[in-house]
Amino acid sequence: MVVLDQPIPGPGSGRRVAAAVLVCLLLGAASAQAALIELLVDAGSEEEAIASGLEEALVRVAGFQSPALARLLPGMLEDPVQPWLRSRAGRGEGRFLLVFDRSELRAALRESDVPVWLGSRPALLVWAVLERGERRLLLGSGLDEDAVLATLQEWAGQRDLPLVFPLGDLEDRRQVYLADVVGGITEGLAEPSRRYDPDGLLLLHLQQRDAGVRARAWLSYRGHAVQADASAATAADAGREAVAQAIDALGLRQARAAGDEAALLVGFSGITSMGDLQALRSRLAALEAVHAAQLNRLLPAAAVLDLRSGLDAPGLAEVLAAEGFRITDPPGDPEAGVTLWFLLPRSAP
């Protein structure tokens, strides 16, 4: 339910109230949409489809694969009730549509103390070089030999991970030294990466060998440096495995086990337009730490939201601070019941 503050005097107050109601609807729609995970799974039987789909859904919620998650899976499959599975339906021979309840998956992860990536998933820019003999190719949207980037894009979609792929156009080829990608030197790629405004960099070197393809990955994000190495029969498979290992290692560093879900009133200053409210909604929707967000009241240049989270106030403050939100004093007189106040970031952290 929307609880608006006292009517805002002056011109445009009606528009601001209407905007508040609209944002509430947007927040509610985003929460409802995020409550379910729909997966189309190819498998030999319904039982196999549920096992495969459950693992994919759990990894999507947690953000990465981990030993703790792998240990949780068998017990969930043995549960005769399976409260986390909303529906199942056949979609032709060997194909099944499964709908999972995100809140039940969260509860299972929480009860088993499985670490979860509670912050936003980073937009990583992928610089990939495919090497065959003496030939080195910089892969991009215009040149994707062996469907390496297409495979990564499909895999990233299953993880809710916003990978960014370069154009690989003339400007990229002029600025990118392939030796930097092959050697995992992220510093040399800082300048050509600016045009894509990523959160971090993911370098991938794919080398053709007699027995298949070796892939080496280097990941750089917020001071974290991760390396991974994998081999497979094809460049696409080797690249996907190396990137998955790197993301799993990074996720483990970023993660923590969530507690019981609780509601917190959180204030956000610096909101002066509908665009600011939409930006806030987008930022909060990207956080696994925030399960739902409801507009509680609108103030001059600020808003108070009812956030449901698996973190207490200090834990939520830590996650939001890492996302670029700065703790600030409340505007005017303190609002009753508001636990935290933040200043809305103007740009990505």
Image: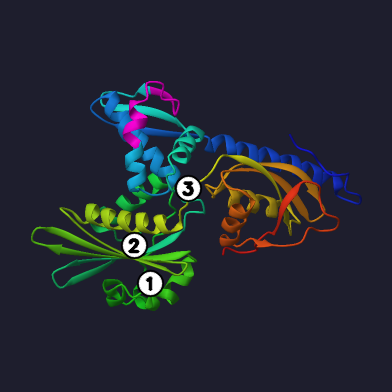
Q: Do the residues labelled 1 and 2 touch (CB within 8 Å)?
A: yes
Q: Give the range drawn in magenta.
A: 73-88
- Dot 3, crowdedness within 10 Å: few (<14), some or many (≥20)? some
Nearest the eye: 152 or 334? 334
Q: Earlier in the sequence, mark 3 or mark 1?
A: 1
196 relative to 240 in the view: left or right:
right
Q: Is mark 3 on a helix, strand or loop?
A: loop
- Dot 1, crowdedness within 10 Å: few (<14), some or many (≥20)? some
Please state the horizontal and vertical placement of residue 45, each as a whole percent of the image: 25, 24
Picture residue at 52% right of the left edge, 54% below the top: 119
Q: Which of marks 3 and 2 is nearer the N terminus?
A: 2
Please state the horizontal and vertical placement of residue 187, each as a whole percent of the image: 39, 77
Which residue in the structure is indicated by mark 3?
257
Which residue in the structure is indicated by mark 1?
172
Image-quadrant location for residue 26: top right
Give the Cα distance between marks 1 and 2.
9 Å
